[in-house]
Image: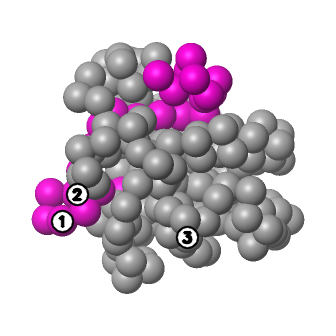
Amino acid sequence: MQMKQIHHLVWRLMLSGVALASGPAIGAEAPCPGTPLDSTLQPLTTDAPVSLCRHLGEVVLVVNTASQCGFTSQYEGLETLYQRFRKRGFTVIGVPSDQFGGQEYADDEKIAAFCKLNFGVSFPMYTRSRVTGDDAIALYRALLAATGQAPQWNFHKYLIGRDGRVLGEWPSRISPHDAQLVSAIDAALDD
C-alpha cells in the first residue's frame, strides 16, 4: 500500500471513531418513535424527566392511579405482578391522576409516601398527570390513538409489548390478578 493510501485509511478510521463516539452513549435509551413510549415523564421522587423509551424491549403495564379511590387496593396486585414478572422483562408504570373524582393527592411526595408505606410500591411511579382530554400527556394521547379507549376511571390498564405496540387494555374493575390480564402479560413475555 502506498503511503497516501495508508494516510487516507487512517483518516477514515479516525473519522469513523469520531462518528461512533458521538453516537448514543452505552446504556442510553434507544429511540422509539411511533410508540406510546416515545415521551418523557418525571418520576415522583426526582426532578429530572426520563424517557419512557428506556422501557422499549420490556413488557409494560401502564396504569393511571389514585390514592383515595375504591380501586386503590389494586396497588397491591400491581406490585405483586411487578415482583412476579420483572426478572423476565416486565414493568409497571404508574401515572397518578386526579381527573376522576379528585381522588389523588396534589403533592407528589405525599403520593410517593402513600404508595410506599401502604403498598410497598417499588415499580416506577411518575408525577401526577392528566390522562384524558386535550391536555392529556403524550403517553395517554398515544394510548388513546392506539386503542380508541381513554381511561374512564382510575386504574385503567394498558399492556404494551416489547416492540412498543399496545397489546390490550382493561378497565378499572379488572383486578391485576385477573386471569386474562395475567395470561396476556405471560404471553407477551414469551414473545
Query: Horizontal and vertical percent for residue 29?
Result: 52, 41
Question: Residue 153: x and y, percent?
Answer: 37, 61
Q: Residue at x 73, y 64 (%)?
A: 178
Q: Is residue 90 above or below residue 26?
A: below
Q: Residue at x 54, y 34 (%)?
A: 124
SS for callout 1: loop
Mark 3 → mark 1, Cα distance in angstroms: 19 Å
Q: Is residue 85 left or right of residue 39?
A: right
Amino acid under label 2? Ala
Between 125 and 66, the residue placed more toward the observer is 66
The image quarter containing residue 182 is: bottom right
Residue at image mark 1: 133
Residue 80 falls in image quadrant: top right
Say which amino acid is labelled 1: Gly
Between the C-alphas of marks 2 and 1, the distance is 5 Å
Callout 3 amino acid: Trp
Q: Quadrant of residue 44?
A: top left
Horizontal arrangement in the rendering, residue 124 relative to residue 64 (left or right): right
Tag 2–tag 1 contact (CB < 8 Å): yes
Along the polypeptide, which appears first: circle 3 or circle 2? 2
What number is the disc on residue 136?
A: 2
Number of marks present in the image shown: 3
**Vertical placement of 189 versus 16: above or below?**
below
Residue 170: mark? 3
Q: Quarter holding the N terminus?
A: top right
